[in-house]
Image (spheres, grey):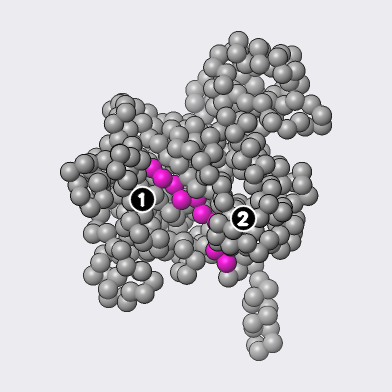
Amino acid sequence: MAKTKEDVLRAIDQHKVKYIRLWFTDILGQLKGMSVTTRELENVLEEGQGFDGSSIEGFVRIEESDLVAWPDLKTFRILPWQVNDEKVAFMMCDITTPDKKPFVGDSRWVLKKVLAQAEKKGWTFFCGPEIEYFYFSSPTDPTPIDQGGYFDYSTVSPGTRMRKAAANALEALEIPVECTHHEVAPSQHEIDLRYQEALIMADFVMYYRLTVKELALREGYYATFMPKPLFGQNGSGMHTHQSIFNGSKNLFYDPQEKLYHLSDSARHYIGGIFKYVREICLGLSQWVNSYKRLVTGYEAPVYVCWGTKNRSALIRIPEYKPGKESATRVELRSADPACNPYLAFALMFAAGLKGIEEKLEPPPPVEKDIFRLTQQEKKELQIGCLPSSLEEAICEFEKSELVKETLGDHLFDSLVANKRVEWDLYRIHVSKYELDKYLPIL
């Protein structure tokens, strides 16, 4: 992995790289970027690469369009496949204004800003997402290409072959893969990445999505991270395992706590997520379609509760294994893989940090199947609900001081405006369901 300008230039020369892609992310989590030649790269590393930000979603207005992309040398990688028979490298960029001030609409900078709060205490935020997705025949035909189920394995399945190729490519990009498997729904797959510091992992999520999609297209298929592409089947989640370390010490582990081995800090972190989860939900599940996934009966969380064995819960505590203190963590299950990972991780961590600062206590854990409880039983157990629609999530998000503080006014206002347009377009659309159901009888 390159760490200095000299390392990057040496690797480019050694591997005969022709072009370098400079990537960044818009507020919706869509990968953006431009390519420069190797001849221009040295100058770019010294002076940045200017570009017009006025057409990038959530960036700037036309009258204030000039921005500069600064490649992060630590993110330098060479694609393990060729583009038009040429070697191509890439780097993730930080975005600044022309006077080199951090651009407030850069979601990567927002995550850095939140992580800096922990760094002042000597803390490091780690996360490990379980990223699910589907393979289909094309972007217009959501027909599954296999009928496999959870952990099914077939060497002749095109989905299995593409998943293996994607995992190999990620490893070639120095992105450690923990495991891969078929998921519950037909044609649904998962590749799990090894725990990393949050900023590194957010970059990895962007590379992951590109790699899976690119390699599927090369085989004539389409990979999608749409949260709920198939009616009557499980949607795709991004269950995110989280912990905080101080050096080598896991702040979430307490050997004296017998039930879950969770420290006070871990419990307060959960309390923070519980208090603020409705407010941050839009950042974790940001599309109209996200709320088709967050419904009962498909393993996605609907209710705000926690436990160890309860997979209908919002937060699950993976069971403690003796000698694995460093693996003590909390798993937040509501995010989906179509989110902006920088904003999602920033909001999760900000909520958890507030919980630690305010010493918030979560309600008692629930190990029952929440879907079978009565309304009265849920009330007695202090079980709330996540927003059930994009509109409800926008309303909760819009009134949140925590969200405004975390994202800043520019990004907060841009995201709310974008999502209100999305909701209005969905709200006025006349769907096939309505025509099939009502046209014959009304």
User: Would you name the residue on which mark 1 appears?
Assistant: 318
Query: To which residue does mark 2 refer?
Result: 153
The quadrant of the rendering that contains the C terminus is bottom right
Percent across and percent down for residue 338 are 56, 50
Earlier residue among tags 1 and 2: 2
User: Which residue is outermost to the top?
Assistant: 6
Mark-to-mark CA distance, 1 and 2 = 25 Å
| Residue at 64% over, 83% down | 438
| Residue 374 inside the magenta-drawn segment | no
- In the rendered view, would you say 430 is above or below 46? below
Q: Quadrant of residue 153?
A: bottom right
- Please tell me which residue lies in front, 167 or 266: 167
Q: Which residues are magenta?
A: 233-242
Q: Amino acid at mark 1?
A: Pro
Q: Residue furthest bottom?
A: 441
As for residue 237 lying within the magenta part, the answer is yes
The amino acid at mark 2 is: Tyr
| Residue at the (57%, 18%) spot, across then down | 2
